[in-house]
Every structure is written in C-alpha cells, then in structure tokens.
Amino acid sequence: RDSVVLLHALSRLALPNPLTALHVHHGLSPHADAWEAHCRQLCAALGVELCVARVSVGRDGGLGLEAAARQARYRIFAESAAEVLLLAHHQGDQAETLLFNLLRGSGVTGAAAMPVERGLAGKRLLRPLLAVAPAELDAYARLYGLSWVEDESNADTTLTRNFLRHEVMPLLAGRFPGVTHSLTQAAGHFAEAEILLGELAASDWQNCASGQGLRLPAARQLSPQRLKNLLRWRLRQLGWQVPVAARLNEFVRQLQSAEPDRHPSLTLPQGEMRVKRGVLLWNGIQ
C-alpha cells in the first residue's frame, strides 16, 4: 500500500527528472513472481518505467532473515543508477523503528530512528512520507481506488517488527491514543540531539586530530562521555561498525589510563583501532 501510494502521488507531479519504479524480487515468498507481475501492471497503467532487481537472500554472517533481506535490498539501492531514491516509510514505521531500537538498548542514533534524508553511495535517499499517518495513506488509496498486494509475512508475529505492529502498538494506542505521533515526534527530538553531538564530535576532531589519527594527550583532556562520542562519530565517518557499549567503555578506559609503553587496541570487523606513538590510528582490513 505505502509504495503504491507513493508511486501514484509521484506520478501525478511534474517532476524535473524521469520517474522510475524499482522492485526488489527477494524470492522468499511463493507469490514473489505474482508481486512482480502486479508491479508491471501498475507501472504500465501509470506510464512509469519499472526496473526489477532479483536478489538471493541468505543468512551468511549470522543475520536473521529480515536483516539479510534488508541488506540485499539496500545493496540494490546503492547500485542503482538513480540520483535520488524515495522510500515509502511512514509515521507508523518510524514509531515502530524507535520502539524497536530502544528495546535493543540503542543510543541517541538508534532513538533518532529513520532520517528523512541521508546519503547512500553518492545518492540522496529520501523518505517523504515519514510524517504521514497510516490512516492518511488508507484514505488516499481509497480516494483513487488503488490496489496492492500484501506480503503474507507481514502477519507473522514471530518477527519482531510484526509483533510490535500487531501486538504492542495497538495495546499502547488503547492507553495513549496519539502514541504513533508522539513516538515520531520523540524520534525527531533525538535526531536533533544526534546532529548536535555530531557537531561537537567534529569540533573535538579538529582540536585533537593529527592527520588521520587522534592525538592521545589531547583526547585524554576530554571526558569519557565526550571521547566515546568522538570515537563513535569517527567510526561512522569511516563506515565502520560501532562496537557495543561495554567494549567501547573498556577501550576508552584503557585510552585514558594506559601507561606510555602500552598500546590499547580494539578490533572490529572493518579493521583495528590501535595506539601507536601516542596517536590512535584506524587500520582497515585491505
């Protein structure tokens, strides 16, 4: 429904650039081919070009099926020839993402949930419906007589997001009628806080950096919280995975207390952070 509404609305606008629909065929459902056929029929009716990308979803790397499918989907997004990609996530999705991330113990970045805009492989990835309530999408779909297909896995409450959507959110809405709007608003507040933390980290990097490394004597003048913020920011700048809180806490403790002859290090999937001659360096895996 959400993608159909977004595509229909976009097709009615006088866009300055050509509009193309992208359908990722995951091959996980016995109805996957029928979904592709529906997309072709819809795009033909709207006069929109359709690009279909077929992917093979495995569970390599210990990912669950949801995460593996998302990874495959975003790989296709990154490889797309488009300059701008628009996704149909809405207010309900944003509220669920915030709740999901909080239950995982995420920090400010996770609590900010999904950004309205971010970069992806040199492209702009936009979510123009993020402030739109699901009921508004239903009303639009009814107004224009739109049809769509439902992924049967959306009803499977053994999947965490579906459990939140079908079990938890209705329960919360019974006590807090504006819960979706409130959670989305909270995500916006967290997003503002994340921007401020990023600006603080960028300033600290300017003051403490030496080339591509971090001068340890200068870094030690920062509070543990501020140093952790700087390290998280640096890792995200490099596209590295941020370690869990316990590992990062211990590494910061070592950085602030290590004797000159000690060389604290932290190994991550993308490489190693290691102190050498009083400078913290990032050595990526070649």
Image (cartoon, rainbow, N blue to C red):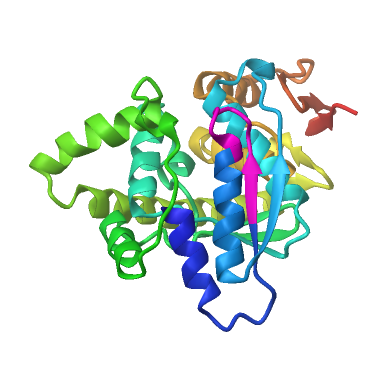
Residue 143 drawn above or below residue 266:
below
Out of 156 and 278, give the one closest to the viewer: 156
Residue ID at (53%, 28%): 66
Q: Which of the 4 image quadrants contains residue 269?
A: top right
Seen from the viewer's position, the closer of residues 73 and 5 is: 5
- Work out which residue is located at the far left of the displayed protein and give it: 175
In percent of width and height, residue 141 lies at 35, 62
In depth, the one of 228 and 238 nearer the eye is: 238
> What is the tally of numbered marks visible in this picture?
0
Q: Position of residue 250 (x, y in %)?
A: 57, 18
Task: Please say whether residue 128 is visible from this viewpoint.
Answer: no
Determine the residue positioned at 12% across, 45% down. Answer: 176
Residue 49 in magenta?
A: no
Quarter of the figure with residue 267: top right
Is residue 238 among the parts visible in the rendering? Answer: yes
Q: Left or right of 274: which side holds 231?
A: left
Is 221 on the left or on the right of 78, as rendered?
left
**Is residue 227 positioned above or below 120 on the image?**
above
Task: Looking at this view, name the residue that lies furthest to the right.
Answer: 286
Q: Position of residue 90 (x, y in %)?
A: 39, 54
Q: Quadrant of the C terminus?
A: top right
Asked whether residue 31 is drawn in magenta, I would say yes
Q: Position of residue 155 (x, y in %)?
A: 35, 30
The magenta-colored residue range is: 22-33
